[in-house]
Amino acid sequence: MSATQVIYTLWLREMKWFLRGKTRIIQSVVQPFLWLAIIGIGMSSAFKLPGGQSYLQFMAPGIIGMTLIFSSIMSGVSVLWDKQFGFLKEILVAPVARTHIMLGKALGGVTTSLLQGLLLLIAAALVGVWPPTILALAQVMVFMIFISLAFVSLGLAFASKMTDPVAFPLVANFLVMPLFFLSGALFPLATAPDWMKAIAYVNPLRYGVDGLRGAIIGLSDLPLWVDFGVLLVFSTAMILIGGYLFRKTSI
């Protein structure tokens, strides 16, 4: 098989695995939407933001970022189930490059993450949150792609060194929750203590959320090119690390 065929076949398999889990798809959209509809609307009166934005508008990009990082990093679970049932062993001993196997799985994870992010973005439009222009929508898509790519690669890196699919979500949550809460998704980092700001500056999700917020409502702490540049560097590093660890994985 050619590299393209290998990548496409594994991408298609990831897509089928995702689309068959109807309950998982519904949960991945309904739960974040409830955050928006209940917490976002309920807390709007308690927050005063510059530019006249409501707390709901401020929070929506953060919840989209949360959806992307959770769905992306959890794509590593499929690698562990493939290990468990012997499928990964079969494809690793096949005469195909492990890099192509990793790319197929990574692209599948990125696609499913983007689908969930887009569904939530459409849901956010129902409560009045939507990019104001086509250019802004394109910027949102770019940030969503790079957030997904970075954390899918991170999930695959972890999965390459683990064997228990049940333990993986625990490890993922242990990593993801601090990243989410320290990303500025739920509150402006400008009002945070100095020690929290310092941690936030080395949090890659902070730049993804800031970029999404800047594109969607025009409110960001940093220029969009800075947010994009940091995400680009982090994504590249995660792809290289994830690819290296996946090539070294043993069954």
Image (cartoon, rainbow, N blue to C red):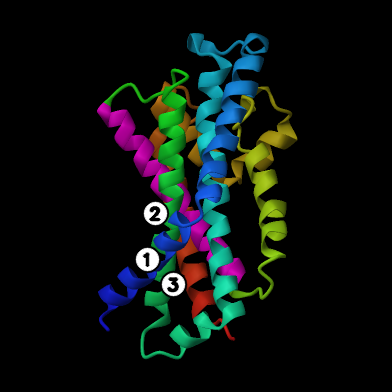
Q: Disc 3 and disc 2: Cα gap in Å?
A: 14 Å
What residue is rendered at 50% in x and 58% in y? 152
What residue is rendered at 55% in x and 19% in y? 56
Q: Nearer the viewer, mark 3 or mark 2?
A: 2
Q: Disc 2 and disc 1: Cα gap in Å?
A: 9 Å
Residue numbers of the magenta segment: 134-159
Q: Quadrant of the C terminus?
A: bottom right
166 versus 118 height, above or below: below
Check disc 1 and report the residue beneath it.
11
Q: Nearer the viewer, mark 3 or mark 1?
A: 1
Type of amino acid at the residue the image marks with label 2: Thr
Type of amino acid at the residue the image marks with label 3: Met
Q: Disc 3 and disc 1: Cα gap in Å?
A: 10 Å
Q: Residues within 10 Å of mark 3 (few under 14, many from 20)?
A: many
Pointer 3 and pointer 2: residues touching (CB < 8 Å)?
no
Pointer 2 and pointer 1: residues touching (CB < 8 Å)?
yes
What residue is rendered at 53% in x and 60% in y? 75
Q: Is residue 103 visible?
A: yes
Type of amino acid at the residue the image marks with label 1: Trp
Check disc 2 and report the residue beneath it.
111
Q: Magenta region, mostly helix, strand or loop?
A: helix
Q: Position of residue 76 (x, y in %)?
A: 56, 64
Mark 2 or 1 closer to N-term?
1
Q: Position of residue 208 (x, y in %)?
A: 49, 41
Instruction: Tell whether 95 sits left or right of 199.
Output: left
Mark 3 or 1 closer to N-term?
1
Which numbered tag is attached to residue 102?
3
* Element under disc 1: helix
